[in-house]
Structures are given as structure tokens and as C-alpha cells.
Amino acid sequence: MKTLWRVLTRLQSKIFVFLIAAAAFSSCSKEEPKKEFVARVNDSYLTSADIDSMIGSGSYSKYYRNELIRNWVKREILYQQALREGLPDDPEFRRIIENSQKELAAASMLKKFFDEESFIYEPRDVAEYFEKNKNDFKLFDDSYLVNLIYFNDEDKAVRFRQTAVESDWNKALNVFNGDSSIIKEETRSLKYEHQVHPESLLRILNELYSQEISIILSDEEGNFSVVQMIEKFEKGTIPPFDTIKQQVENKFIAFRKEYLLKDYLRELYSDNEIEIKDIK
């Protein structure tokens, strides 16, 4: 889909850029001297609270924090030098800022529209969309539908495989539910051939029959994995709906949003005076 929905995506992608520019403007005002700060460039201060605000929730490494501080200092030095040389008064600079403001406002308006214009759909709507647009879901590479699990304990990996072979994969998952030795688990995951790493895993998948479970695989990091090859699909195949249901649903939502956006823009066009003199 190339149309208006891609325009929206491009507009939203520029919000972050504009926010950086806005942050630079906000830092130009002189602040009261602070006793506690992480870094300072003349009258501009960076505090621990500022860093927490930039990073947001979640953990982060000491290296990432230090890199953020260094980048802040570099930005402040360049920004303050730009002020001294009168760059913000340059007509070209002001034009760029004005355009960024318009794009930010347009993207924010579209976000507001979609937040308020929620739509309801049923599972059958997604299934019908798939049936009407099957060719859009042809696989562009050989692919594998797999179950995959990683352990940091070899004994647990061995016991999981034994349970899965003796019963089935889902029962093994139930037995090991919540086990702390599980690093990662993927159920009915569709992977393109180029996404399968390491190379040894790809070789194993090519040797397995449908529903067959692999031997224990180890990697250089000391982890142990087990994979079940559910089904292999050749390039150009249209996989069953239940295999790519989430992908279809995402595309269906994007399609419906684009349709809503067209109606909304058509209404705006009718409410405004628009004159275009030169489109070639």
C-alpha cells in the first residue's frame, strides 16, 4: 500500500527529529546554577532527572548512559556556538524549523484522528480480507514453520526434548512452564530462510521431516536449543491463514486505516479552499 498511509508513516517518523530541535531551543535559556548536575556547558545543565527522562523506563547499561552524556555535551557545544554565530536567525534555518513544525502538527493531527476514530472488526473480517488478497501473502523466500526453545541448562534441554518426543511439544511446554532455565521460546513461528541463524540450525531444519524434533543444539554462548520443524513452505507459496494470522490482521488494520484516512481527507478537502496551478 503506497498511498496515504505511507504519507502518515513518513510524517510520524519526523516527530523525533523535530523534538530534538525543540529540545535544543529549550536549552538555550540560561538556567539558575545547580549544585547537583551530571554535566554542564556554560549555563546549560544536565541532571540525573534529565537523563531518566531521556531514557524512559527500563534498564540500561553504564556505557549507554555515558554515551548519552557525551552526546548531550557535543550537542550543547554546537548549539551554543550556533547561537553565537546567529544561525537561528538565518532564513533557511527558520524555513526548516517552520516545515518541521507543520509536519509535526500534521502527524499529531492524524494520530489524534485515529485515536478518536477507533473501528471495530470481527475475526471473520480478517479471514475475508485474506481470502480476497491471498496473492499479497505469497512468501518471497523458502520458509519454515517451527517451534523453538532455548535453555541455559543442558540437562533441562535434554529433559524437555524427551518429554516432547514422548508426548508432544505443547505438553512439554506445560511441564516446563515458568522454568528459570528457559531463555526464549517461540511457538509456531514462521521464519524465512535468511532469518534462520546460526547456519547449523538451518542445516538441521533442512534434514528434519514434518513434525520431527531435533537433537539438542548448542551455541558458542553455552545455550542449548531444541527445534521442531512443523512444516516447510517453498518460495511463492501462500501459507495457510492460521499460520500468518497476525500478519494478515496487521495488514488488514493498515488497510482499514488508510480507507478511513481517505474519507477524512476528502472531508477536509471539501471544507477548505484549495487551488493547484502547476502539477505536471
Image (spheres, grey):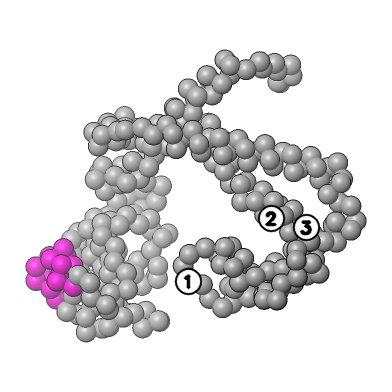
Label 2: element kind: helix
Magenta segment main secondary structure? helix
User: Could you tell me which residue is drawn at 69 percent across and 55 percent down?
Assistant: 23
* Closer to the eye: label 2 or 1: 2
Where is residue 71, by image quadrant? Answer: bottom right
Label 1: element kind: loop
Residue type at mark 2: give it: Ala
Q: Nearer the viewer, residue 217 or 224?
A: 224
> Label 2: which residue?
23
Q: Which mark is residue 29?
A: 3
Label 3 environment density (alpha carbons within 10 Å; few <14, some 14–19, many ≥20): few
Asked if residue 200 is among those painted magenta in the image, a careful observer would answer no
Label 1 environment density (alpha carbons within 10 Å; few <14, some 14–19, many ≥20): few
Give the quadrant of the C terminus.
Answer: top right
Label 2 environment density (alpha carbons within 10 Å; few <14, some 14–19, many ≥20): few
Q: Nearer the viewer, residue 75 or 8?
A: 75
The location of residue 29, given as percent across then percent down, is: 77, 57
> Label 1: which residue?
59
Label 3: element kind: loop
Where is residue 119, by image quadrant? Answer: top left
